[in-house]
Amino acid sequence: MLDQTEKQQSPKPSLPPELRAVLTILESDDELKRKALPHVNIERQDINWNNIFANDFGSGHRACLSWAKSLWTDRAPAKVDIFDRSFSMSPRLQAVVLKALAIRWGLAS
């Protein structure tokens, strides 16, 4: 029987908190998974935001994506009030964004 250390595979390098926060948002919803997640290259830690926003999203999903991009870039959008737009998100998506904020700030994993 193998002991615990022998069972473990080599650890994957941990992802930076900004990428984990974005992935938390994008993986939380079927539409976001289908339309946005294909534009994330985890290996290169690269996100093609132009291709993501080229998709047709409703206001709640677009607000979620604005939060995700803000967490990724550490900047609030210049022409968008993401706090105001957050009211168009469902309570479930609002909770996911709060969780992503906590991940980005190092308060959750």
Image: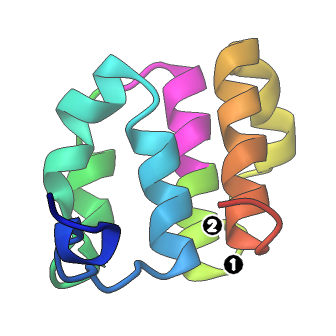
Q: Main secondary structure of the magenta part?
A: helix
Report which residue position mark 1 lands on: 75
Q: Image quarter for residue 85?
A: top right
The amino acid sitting under disc 1 is: Arg
Tell me, yes or no, whether the two marked residues, 2 and 1, touch with CB atoms within 8 Å.
Answer: yes
Q: Image quarter for residue 29?
A: top left
Q: Return the x and y of residue 102 as percentages of the image width and height.
A: 78, 59
Of the 4 image quadrants, the one containing the C terminus is bottom right
Q: Return the x and y of residue 62 as percentages of the image width and height.
A: 51, 35
Picture residue at 34% right of the left edge, 31% below the top: 32
Give how far apart the Cα atoms at labels 2 and 1 are: 5 Å
Give the magenta-colored segment's residue range: 57-66
Q: Is residue 4 left or right of residue 54?
A: right
- Does any portion of residue 78 appear in the rendered image? no
Q: Which of the two residues, 7 or 40, is positioned nearer the viewer here? A: 7
- Secondary structure at badge 1 equals loop
Picture residue at 68% right of the left edge, 17% below the top: 92
Rendered view: 73 above or below 27: below
The amino acid sitting under disc 2 is: Ser
Rendered view: 89 above or below 72: above
Q: Is residue 46 left or right of residue 104?
A: left
Rendered view: 88 above or below 3: above
- Secondary structure at badge 2 equals helix
Picture residue at 83% right of the left edge, 66% below the top: 107
Q: Return the x and y of residue 45 as percentages of the image width and height.
A: 27, 81
Report which residue position mark 2 lands on: 70
- Mark positioned earlier in the residue sequence (2 or 1): 2
